[in-house]
Image (cartoon, rainbow, N blue to C red):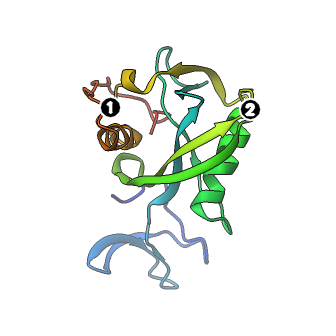
Amino acid sequence: MLHPDYRFCPRCAAELSVGHSGGRDRNRCTACGFVHWNNPAPVVAALLQVGDEILLARNAAWPPKTFALITGFLEAGETPEEGIAREVKEETDLDAQRIDLIGVYEFTRKNELIIAYHVVATGSVRLSEELAEFRMVPPHKLRPWRAGTGMAVADWMRARGLPYEFVDLPPRPQSEPV
């Protein structure tokens, strides 16, 4: 999918046009040859365990009763494990004690690639201003959703022999949970 707002070349400011490059149509600059590859952004996600329960959070921009995993963009110069430990600390003030990979998931609707971890953390929860509230959920009561991080929840539950049913989510605005 070509990003509709990416209209001008960051090198020479000429207007971009659609051209074929690397086997696909891409926004490109005919003046200087720049190609906007529009690669997916790497996102890290934590299925965050505190004690015997899983912490789900609601972003301040989301509708009430919409909870998901702790997520954030991977920053330059950090490993995915460092990135998720940082996100957990920034968003919940918890300290990651153990980080285990669950899997990697596509989230094409937002052009993201999600690297999901099971993170065991300790401390007292203190939410960042980005998050409105949180819930602690026993693992057997988790209800995965059919997109993004919901698939990681299902895989984590399956690996532990926990039964689950997917919950259908209504269509979400751009600030939707991943």
* Picture layout, residue 86 above or below residue 60: below
Quarter of the figure with the N terminus: bottom left
Please tell me which residue is depicted at 74% across the width and 35% down the height of the picture. Answer: 93
Is 178 left, or right, of 60 in this rendering? Answer: left
Is 37 or 77 nearer to us in this picture?
A: 77
SS for callout 2: loop
Quarter of the figure with the C terminus: top left
**Which of the 4 quarters of the picture holds residue 125?**
top right
* Picture layout, residue 108 above or below residue 128: below
Is 42 left, or right, of 149 in this rendering? Answer: right
Mark 2 = which residue?
123
SS for callout 1: loop
Q: Position of residue 56 (x, y in %)?
A: 52, 27
Is 99 or 24 nearer to us in this picture?
A: 99
Decide if residue 177 is in sight here.
yes
Q: CA distance from mark 1 to mark 2?
A: 28 Å
Mark 1 = which residue?
145
Q: Position of residue 128 (x, y in %)?
A: 73, 31
Please tell me which residue is depicted at 45% across the width and 33% down the height of the picture. Answer: 176
Is 71 left, or right, of 77 in this rendering? Answer: left
* Picture layout, residue 140 above or below residue 115: above
Task: Determine the residue located farthest toward the top in the rendered image.
Answer: 64
Of the numbered discs 1 and 2, the one sitting upstream in the chain is: 2
Q: Which label sits on residue 29? A: none
Q: Within 10 Å of the Cα at label 2, are there few (<14), some (14-19), or many (20+) other Cα atoms? A: few
- The amino acid type found where label 2 is placed reads Gly
Please tell me which residue is depicted at 27% across the width and 28% down the height of the picture. Answer: 164
Q: Position of residue 97 (x, y in %)?
A: 66, 47
Disc 1 vs disc 2: which is toward the camera? 2
- The amino acid type found where label 1 is placed reads Trp
Q: Within 10 Å of the Cα at label 1, are there few (<14), some (14-19), or many (20+) other Cα atoms? A: some
